[in-house]
């Protein structure tokens, strides 16, 4: 499951060091347009995520996942061959659209097997492995650029997807229970998806996570300009980006160790409040002028709080939907990716040569997230529901 989600992350992070080279080779005049290579992929991943979960509720998780991997392989090769920036955006859009199941269905597979705080623990372990990709992907992309052109990056993506396809084909059993198979009818699909958005205990976490995700994607979209250019990191950007992701991966492991003891709600509620506090403090520092040595630790602290928020919000929101986990995961990922990607594009385009717009967006995202959680929890934070079963 981590390998599947990691391929989607690879499609974003491996090319961050190449965005400047790609924009020059394809004749871009506005430097902010390079961000669309990431933003368009994310928006279309969100739009496409409505489909694979519903299909997997009928046909099973395995065949849908293998079809997504085949599309990833083919379209990655297509991206390597384009000669026009608009054509590249079209290929990136199709890649996001047809491979969205690789980010949606691991959630459904985990829900098929686990529930409650144990599900949150497994989600955190998957996220921990998944976060290794942002740690190494920019360095891999930088290494490719030193010996080959940016097109070779897409060829590597295709090769890795082929490896994962063979692995999934050999190792992943079908996890959908036969009694839970749903009809492929628009009315039934819309009913199942509507149930996810109409369940009060879930919807606040779904939308709240989209705001947090949007702030993170806003940072990713502008990270090359902000860290490499504004703060002058240059060729050290992939190392700095990877080190921050490594720390974030470590906090996902910490979450997996503590969530069953304290509960997903207690951990994620506390993390959201800390996230708001860090964003406020960072904004105060940045308003007076800061350097890379101040920015990197504070941004890393915010990213660490996201580790305690993401997997736990996700697990809490999926808990009520054992029979329709695919449809629920699809609509959750749709809101998370489309909402988050659109916000990320807006935040990235607001980049003005300083980190201030990004930090304002992070503060607002945290405040909106805690307000939505309060709605889902009917005004009560830190409750303990669905404790792990023993015996």
Image: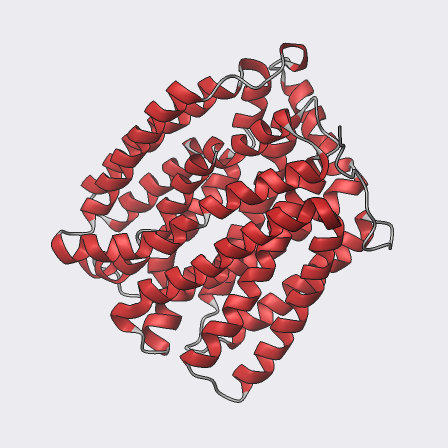
**Outermost residue toward the bottom?**
288
Decide: is 288 above or below 274: below
Instruction: State the image coordinates of residue 28 (x, y, percent, origin top left).
Output: 26, 60
**Residue 372: x, y in percent?**
75, 54
Q: Quadrant of residue 277?
A: bottom right
Between 285 and 169, the residue placed more toward the observer is 169
Looking at the image, which is closer to me, 291 or 386?
386
Q: How many marks?
A: 0
233 displayed left or right of 255: left
**What residue is at 20 percent from the left and 61 percent from the top?**
24
Residue 193: horizontal and vertical position, in percent? Answer: 68, 30
Residue 151 visible in rendering: yes
Residue pictured at 59% horizontal, 72% vertical: 360
Quadrant that contains the C terminus: top right
The picture places residue 307, in percent across and down from the top left corner, at: 57, 54
Residue 55 picture quarter: top right
Q: Using residue 1 as the reference point, say whether residue 50 is left or right of it.
A: right
């Amino acid at each position: 499951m981590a390998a599947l989600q990691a391929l989607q992350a690879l499609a974003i992070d491996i090319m961050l060091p190449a965005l400047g080279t790609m924009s020059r080779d394809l004749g871009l005049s506005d430097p902010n347009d390079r961000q669309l290579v990431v933003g368009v992929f994310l928006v279309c991943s969100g739009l496409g995520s409505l489909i694979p979960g519903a299909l997997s509720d009928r046909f099973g998780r395995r065949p849908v996942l293998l079809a997504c991997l085949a599309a990833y392989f083919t379209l990655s090769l297509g991206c390597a061959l384009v000669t026009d920036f608009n054509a590249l955006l079209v290929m990136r859009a199709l890649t996001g659209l047809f491979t969205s199941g690789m980010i949606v269905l691991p959630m459904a597979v985990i829900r098929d097997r686990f529930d409650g705080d144990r599900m949150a623990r497994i989600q955190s372990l998957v996220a921990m492995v998944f976060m290794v990709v942002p740690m190494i992907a920019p360095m891999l992309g930088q290494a490719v650029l030193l010996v080959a052109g940016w097109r070779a990056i897409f060829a590597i993506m295709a090769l890795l997807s082929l490896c994962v396809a063979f692995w999934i084909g050999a190792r992943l059993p079908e996890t959908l229970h036969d009694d839970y198979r749903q009809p492929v009818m628009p009315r039934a699909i819309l009913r199942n998806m509507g149930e996810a958005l109409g369940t009060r205990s879930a919807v606040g976490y779904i939308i709240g996570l989209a705001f947090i995700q949007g702030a993170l994607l806003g940072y990713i979209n502008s990270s090359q300009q902000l860290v490499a250019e504004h703060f002058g990191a240059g060729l050290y950007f992939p190392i700095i980006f990877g080190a921050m992701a490594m720390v974030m991966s470590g906090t996902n492991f910490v979450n997996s160790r503590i969530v069953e003891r304290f509960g997903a709600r207690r951990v994620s509620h506390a993390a959201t409040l800390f996230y708001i506090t860090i964003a406020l403090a960072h904004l105060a520092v940045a308003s007076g002028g800061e350097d890379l040595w101040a920015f990197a630790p504070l941004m890393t602290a915010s990213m660490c709080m996201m580790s305690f928020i993401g997997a736990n919000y996700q697990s809490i929101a999926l808990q009520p939907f054992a029979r329709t986990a695919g449809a629920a995961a699809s609509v959750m990922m749709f809101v998370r990716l489309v909402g988050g990607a659109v916000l990320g594009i807006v935040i990235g385009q607001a980049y003005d040569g300083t980190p201030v717009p990004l930090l304002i967006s992070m503060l607002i995202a945290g405040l909106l997230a805690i307000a939505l959680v309060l709605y889902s929890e009917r005004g009560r934070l830190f409750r303990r529901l669905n404790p792990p079963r023993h015996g």
